[in-house]
Image (cartoon, helix red, strand yellow):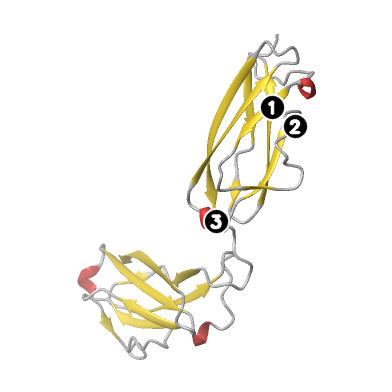
Amino acid sequence: MGFTAALILGGKITAGRITLMGATPVDDAGHQVPDWADYSYSWTIPATVQPDGISTLDPKQSSIQFQTPQNLAGQSLEFSVSITSPDGKTTYSSTTTIPVAPAPQPDGVFTKALILGWNITAGRITLMGATPVDDAGHQIPEWADYSYSWTIPATVQPDGISTLDPKQSSIQFQTPQNLAGQSLEFSVSITSPDGKTTYSSTKAIPVTN
């Protein structure tokens, strides 16, 4: 079978990273045409990305390489290619839209607030904590220097050490017996020591007997 479609290869773009994207002529079964290297490729790429390295957009080049700026995270970018047969008589085009994923932060960078605690028993005292974590879910070493702002249900009674002090990462409360079978929602906002970064988390926890 001969050349019947253009196929774009590459489905992931990460902000701040270099991406290699390719294209190939395929037949009706989706198989690459054997003499693909002899075809011509005409790419249309967004003006917001920067071609990098081998990406000269040369018509004999089936792949492009580009870097996506950090500020495009969360957006979607459209790429198009037209592929022409060696005799110049047949051209097929393809367009794809790909979302830009944010770049993962390195270990040790505060990116999330995590609530610790998933068991509440009616009539008992519960200790619940929170901590700042990085993208890998590891606790930030300086967690004790962070500030914590809790929102707890009005139906539970803070107990003992739970003064909701902003420097306290844990809360302690007693849940009345009549709340058995219900679900209680707890929220925390955690702020970095310099006050510049805040992340929040909310968790609904069922009350058991």
Q: In the rendered structure, which disc, 1 or 2, sits on the residue that comes first in sequence?
A: 1
Which marked residue is nearer to the observer: mark 3 or mark 1?
1
For the residues labelled 3 and 2, the Cα–Cα distance comes to: 28 Å
Q: Is residue 18 left or right of residue 162?
A: right
* Residue situated in front as seen by the camera: 105 or 137: 105
Q: How many marks?
A: 3
For the residues labelled 3 and 1, the Cα–Cα distance comes to: 29 Å
For the residues labelled 1 and 2, the Cα–Cα distance comes to: 6 Å
Dot 3 lies on which element?
A: loop
Dot 1 lies on which element?
A: strand
Q: Residues within 10 Å of mark 2 (few under 14, many from 20)?
A: some
Q: Residue at label 1?
A: 41
- The residue sitting at 56% across, 84% down in the picture is 142
Circles 1 and 2: CB atoms closer than 8 Å: yes
What amino acid is found at the position of numbered circle 1 in the picture? Tyr
Q: Residue at label 2?
A: 61
Rendered image quadrant of residue 191: bottom left
Rendered image quadrant of residue 157: bottom left
What amino acid is found at the position of numbered circle 3 in the picture? Pro
Above or below, 140 against 15 in this view is: below
- The residue sitting at 63% across, 32% down in the picture is 43
Q: Residue at label 3?
A: 102
What amino acid is found at the position of numbered circle 2 in the picture? Gln
Above or below, 152 against 36 in this view is: below
* Residue situated in front as seen by the camera: 31 or 177: 31
Above or below, 159 against 98 in this view is: below
